[in-house]
Image: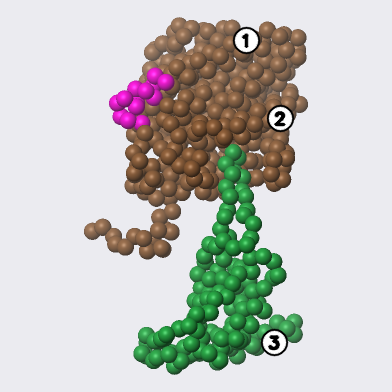
Chain colours: A green, B brown
Amino acid sequence: MKLITCIVRPERVPEVKAALFRAGVTGISLCRVSGHGGEHETVEHYRGTTVVMEFREKVRIEMAVSEPFVEPTIKAILSSARTGEVGDGKIFVQPLDRVIRIRTGERDNDALTAINADEVQRAALAAGREGGAA
Amino acid sequence: MNSGDTAWVLASSALVLLMTVGLACFYGGLVRTKNSLNTMMMSVVALGAVGVLWVVVGYSIAFAPGTPWLGGLGWAGFRGVGLAPDPDYAATIPQLAHAAFQGMFAIITPALISGAIVERMRFRAYIAFILLWSVVVYAPLAHWVWGTGGWLATRGTLDFAGGTVVHISAGVSALVAAVLLGPRRDYRRMPLAPHNVPLVLLGAGLLWFGWFGFNAGSALAANGVATLAFVNTNTAAAAALLTWAFFDLARSKKVTAVGAATGAVVGLVGITPAAGYVSPLSSIAIGFACAAISYTAIQIRSRTRLDDSLDVFSCHGLAGIAGALLTGVFASRALNPGGADGVLAGHPGQLATQALAVLASIALAAVGTVVTLTIVQLTLGARAGVHEEVDGLDRSEHGEEAYIAEALEQGVIVSAAP
């Protein structure tokens, strides 16, 4: 089991979410974060006051996956979050000791798969095909 | 008596009242979230404090017959100020309408000062300060320039709607108050950026709208001079906005919203003393000149230790001085026979008259602010404590927060008091 954390551009979040769902990764949590990476600082002027924005708005997505899902997850994020410009973000993969689903007390791999994972993945794939056709 | 004139002056009074609320939005948007209500209340409370003071003694000191230096107390409490016109001020409207209209000017002027001392002054001390200041500075200066027998009025000073009385007095007092109170703790140590730029634009829009009452209403009649003042008001604001945008472009390659709002206000300040005396083309020149001066002054000021936080001196003091002096350049009796000729109409002496009024206004405002604010500092204590300043004056002075719903959503507030 691995905990995969990725930092992505806020404007790529819908694409990343769709790609993860198509890959069958449906249990994700995300939060807005401020980050500093390789991007240039932006400067704002308010009359005599100059404000240097050193941190950029990013979104951090976290998901716990079983071993067979690690590479598909990474591929999904790479294909959906990449623009080619500095500031596309990072993916961190860490080992995960234990996972417990609170509702049932299930452990580890049993606790990882969301109960409606297949349904969500099917819907995402169908939406992807429609989008591709259109 | 003329019903059209009366209607226009009453409507103009309401427009000028709206300016104080507009100023609250303009200033409130420019400060940080934690001080936004306090900053807005500094304007709003003037509606109450000066609104009463004006009836009790303000109008009398400013306009009642007295000496060249001070009006008498004969009209205290609006005694004898009734529905009959006073031909010294306006022959075709009830004197009470004149008193009400002038009261709105008295309200907004101390509110203008507040921009220099935001985010660090105790609120009760501020109320005491604006009450004292209105009696010591505003009412006497209004008497000098506009009152029957006022010493600057008898010398032929031209101040159509308050370049000296309102803007120079507020701008200079703001500068003195900022020095006396000292800079905010975070000044030049943290970025002090506006918390709500749309609110700044709303405030500037309300100010511009209200300024038609301020300037065109100062004709005290619905006539040609009012129309001239109306057109000049809009033209100068437009010219200054445009000038500010070009300066922004030259400096940072971007036209800023805060800059557009500021430019418009600076143009309105500059045209105030000239509005009913100059031509629309001259008002373009005045708008351009005032914007250039204020823009430069703000850039210089922000590199100093002088925390005139919202640049009241640059915007009102300097643009007010420029407008008052340029009135003496561009004024023409051909446009307004009730005015005077300026330098370009062959009367260079008018510029000297204007300069004297500017110097007198600066002196009274500076000395009066030192005296009144020092009294407040020694009695009530003017500066908020360190903890209050860090925590924000909304909570410490008012027990309120501007965006309380956000705090509730974030779960910061966990329980209701019984």
Q: Quarter of the image containing the C terminus of chain B?
A: bottom left
Which of B105/B319 is in front? B319
Task: From the viewer's side, name the closer residue of B213 and B330.
Answer: B330
* SS at mark 3 in the image: helix
Residue at 36% across, 37% down? B384
What x and y, as percent, mark residue B144? 51, 12
Same chain for the residues under marks 1 and 3 in the image: no
Q: Is residue B408 above or below residue A116?
A: above
Q: Whole-Å distance between the Cαs marked 2 and 1? A: 23 Å
Image quarter where the N terminus of chain B lies is top right
Which quadrant holds residue B323? top right
The residue pinned by badge 1 equals B353
Q: Of helix, strand and loop, which one carries label 1? A: helix
The residue type indicated by label 3 comes to Arg
Q: Nearer the viewer, residue B39 or A97?
A: A97
| Segment colored magenta | B370-382
Residue furthest left as drawn: B418
Mark 2 and mark 3 on one chain:
no
Label 2, residues with CA under 10 Å away: few <14, some 14-19, many ≥20: many
B416 on left or right of B180: left
Task: Say which residue label 2 marks.
Answer: B288
Residue B374 shows in this picture:
yes
Q: Residue at label 3? A: A129
